[in-house]
């Protein structure tokens, strides 16, 4: 992948959809979440026409705050999983990325005060429309030893939701797959904040 990657939520879509474009302007993948499912079901495609599925993300349980989301490729091969850290994520978003049953990476919100300020500012008439320019969350992906490997940050925009993913350190292809799928799932879960 050619970093940085830019993630853009489709503005006028019934079901949440995200396009991920690399630094050369090429579509890396296209994400579509299925609506009206008791268990989350997300498909990641290689094309915007949604004809070539690459990955599937499925929850392990019905509507739960700390469900585990398993990743499989188009052949059904297990790639990894991500899980919110339960009550610890209420104040500061935290997710664990799994390889089997072992958590090898984690995602953590850099500054939880951003979402608090965003929520307060959004309640002010007229000025609340501009929160997308002022309060932009940042998420850091780290290994278990604390080494930072990737960074996701919201780009200041008026209506659309745009994010950028930058690499910080070297990682294996497997780690890269797990991190990108985890960041997509996290954004779908956290999209109402910031």
Image: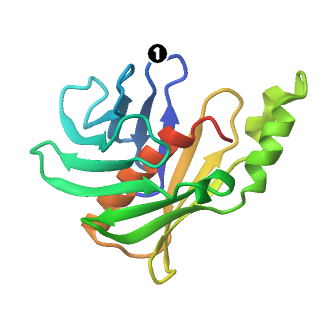
Considering the image in quadrants, where does the C terminus appear?
A: top right
User: In screen coordinates, is 39 left or right of 86?
Assistant: left
In which quarter of the view is residue 173 placed?
bottom left
Q: Nearer the viewer, residue 31 or 26?
A: 31
Residue 178 point in image, percent of width and height: 32, 59
- Position of residue 147 relative to residue 16, above or below, is below
Q: Nearer the viewer, residue 144 or 62?
A: 62
In which quarter of the view is residue 193 placed?
top right
Q: What residue occupies the far left of the structure in this picture?
A: 75
For image coordinates 57% across by 37% down, the residue present is: 191
Q: Is residue 157 visible?
A: yes
Q: Which residue is mark 1?
A: 14
Residue 91 point in image, percent of width and height: 69, 55
Residue 60 point in image, percent of width and height: 30, 44
Q: Residues within 10 Å of mark 1 (few under 14, many from 20)?
A: few
For image coordinates 76% across by 39% down, the residue present is: 133
Residue 74 point in image, percent of width and height: 14, 42
Q: Is residue 1 visible?
A: no
SS under mark 1: loop
Considering the image in quadrants, where does the N terminus appear?
A: bottom left
Q: What residue occupies the far bottom of the structure in this picture?
A: 145
For image coordinates 80% across by 26% down, the residue present is: 129
User: In screen coordinates, is 113 left or right of 77?
Assistant: right
Q: How many marks?
A: 1
Colour logic? rainbow
In which quarter of the view is residue 46 placed?
top left
For image coordinates 51% across by 31% down, the residue present is: 9
């Amino acid at each position: 992948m050619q970093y940085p990657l830019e993630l853009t939520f489709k503005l006028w879509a019934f079901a949440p959809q995200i396009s991920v474009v690399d630094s050369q302007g090429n579509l890396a993948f296209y994400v579509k979440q299925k609506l009206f499912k008791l268990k989350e079901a997300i498909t990641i495609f290689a094309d915007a026409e949604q004809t070539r599925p690459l990955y599937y993300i499925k929850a392990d349980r019905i509507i739960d705050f700390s469900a585990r989301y398993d990743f499989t490729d188009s052949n059904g091969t297990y790639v990894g999983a991500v899980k919110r850290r339960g009550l610890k994520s209420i104040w500061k978003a935290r997710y664990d990325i799994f390889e089997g049953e072992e958590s090898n990476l984690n995602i953590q919100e850099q500054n939880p005060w951003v979402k608090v300020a965003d929520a307060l500012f959004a309640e002010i008439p007229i000025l609340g429309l501009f929160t997308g320019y002022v309060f932009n969350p940042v998420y850091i992906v780290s290994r278990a030893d604390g080494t930072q490997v990737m960074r996701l940050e919201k780009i200041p925009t008026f209506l659309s939701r745009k994010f950028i993913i930058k690499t910080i350190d070297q990682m294996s292809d497997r780690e890269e797959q797990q991190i990108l799928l985890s960041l997509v799932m996290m954004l779908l879960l956290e999209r109402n904040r910031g």
